[in-house]
Image: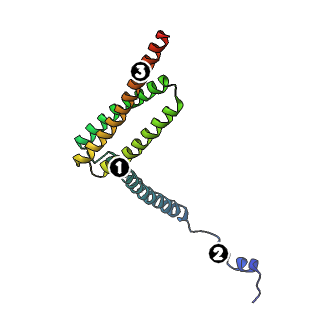
Amino acid sequence: MKQDIRDLFREEEDLKTPPENHRSEFLDKLKKQSQSKKVGYTWLKITAVVIIALAVGLTILYRQPTENVAPIVAQVEAVEAEYLKEINAEWKNFVAIAEDEVLVERFKKKLDELDADYKNISIQFRANPNNLEIVELLIDNLQTRSQILKDIQEHIKILNQKNEQYEQSI
């Protein structure tokens, strides 16, 4: 069973010499093999480019908003932005004029409650934008907040005028 490998190669001396056309046959096989690989990879590259292009195209197509915003939603958002801008300006004016911290805290609490109500109504509006009652509730809430701030400022102005009159009479 044990054999020396060197002995096997000595016996098969005729296997060492390749046939005369061996080199040309080998080169022909190499050329055929490399050509078939190039063709296969070319189709693979073309397929990969097409798949990537389709993926990018579909991504761009679905990234664009398919849902149109209802005109009433756009109008309500515009009115909302205008009222909120006015409310913020009125609040800043009120805080600048007001000298009584208790009064400021009391009205801040009231406005925070109205703001919480407004957020709840806004959620209902987003769920059902075609309900006009909800739209009216949104606008009423904003108008109430704005009117409260205006009334407060008027009241402060009246109080300041009375204080000035008392000071002048003394």
Q: Which mark is residue 14?
A: 2
Q: Amino acid at mark 2?
A: Asp
Q: Position of residue 7 (x, y in %)?
A: 75, 80
Residue at image point 47% right, 17% down: 163
Q: Secondary structure at mark 1?
A: helix
Residue 160 appears left or right of 138: right
Q: Which residue is mark 3?
A: 157
Task: Locate residue 97, reporting x and y percent.
Answer: 47, 22
- 167 vs 74, left or right, is right
| Residue 114 against residue 152 in the figure, above or below | below
- Locate residue 52, reporting x and y percent: 39, 51
Q: Which residue is mark 1?
A: 123
Which kind of residue does numbered mark 3 sit on?
A: Lys
The three-letter amino acid code for the residue at tag 1 is Ile
- Image coordinates for residue 12, horizontal then vertical, percent: 67, 78
Asked if residue 113 lies left or right of residue 77, the reply is right
| Distance CA(mark 2)–CA(mark 3) | 121 Å
**What residue do we see at 48% from left, 37% from top?**
106
> Where the N terminus falls, by quadrant?
bottom right
